[in-house]
């Protein structure tokens, strides 16, 4: 069985990016009745963060070079593993995004 583990990391990263940017995600489709509930947005962020960390953990175990998909600042946040104010405020504020076209 052969598959590209990095495609799953990219998908999880894009989903987290969209979540932090308050854009529509697949998670919204799972729970459409929750969209107007105030705590839904926090739950959605935590679920996307957990998904990203889990996907990275699997990629790491498979020996995939997932680090090149993230900026240095994002890598620092990932290594911290805690979804805190810095992650929510600064995740998208990166001056040099990795070039996804070269991956």
Image (cartoon, rainbow, N blue to C red):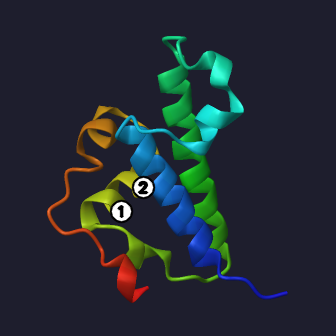
Crowdedness of circle 1 by 10 Å Cα count: few (<14), some, many (20+)?
some
Give the residue pinned by disc 2: 78
Task: Report the residue at 20% width, 58% height from top.
Answer: 94
Query: Along the line of sight, which residue is nearer the eye, 22 or 74?
Result: 22
Is 37 placed left or right of 76 in the picture? right
In this view, the residue farthest toward the left is 95
Position of residue 49 relative to residue 60, above or below, is above
Q: Quadrant of residue 6?
A: bottom right
Res. 60 in view: no
On the rendered image, what quadrant is the N terminus found in? bottom right
Q: Quadrant of residue 87?
A: top left
Task: Report the residue at 44% width, 85% height from top.
Answer: 103
Give the residue pinned by disc 1: 75
Please tell me whether mark 1 sits on a helix, a strand or a loop: helix
Is 23 placed left or right of 54 in the picture? left
- Residues at marks 1 and 2, CA–CA distance in whole angstroms: 5 Å
């Amino acid at each position: 069985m052969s598959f590209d583990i990095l495609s799953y990391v990219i998908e999880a990263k894009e989903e987290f990016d969209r979540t932090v940017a308050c854009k529509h995600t697949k998670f919204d489709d799972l729970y459409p009745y929750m969209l107007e509930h105030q705590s839904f947005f926090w739950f959605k962020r935590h679920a996307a963060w957990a998904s990203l960390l889990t996907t990275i953990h699997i990629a790491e175990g498979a020996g995939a070079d997932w680090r090149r998909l993230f900026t240095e600042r994002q890598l620092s946040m990932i290594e911290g593993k805690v979804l805190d104010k810095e992650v929510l405020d600064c995740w998208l504020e990166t001056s040099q995004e990795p070039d996804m076209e070269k991956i």
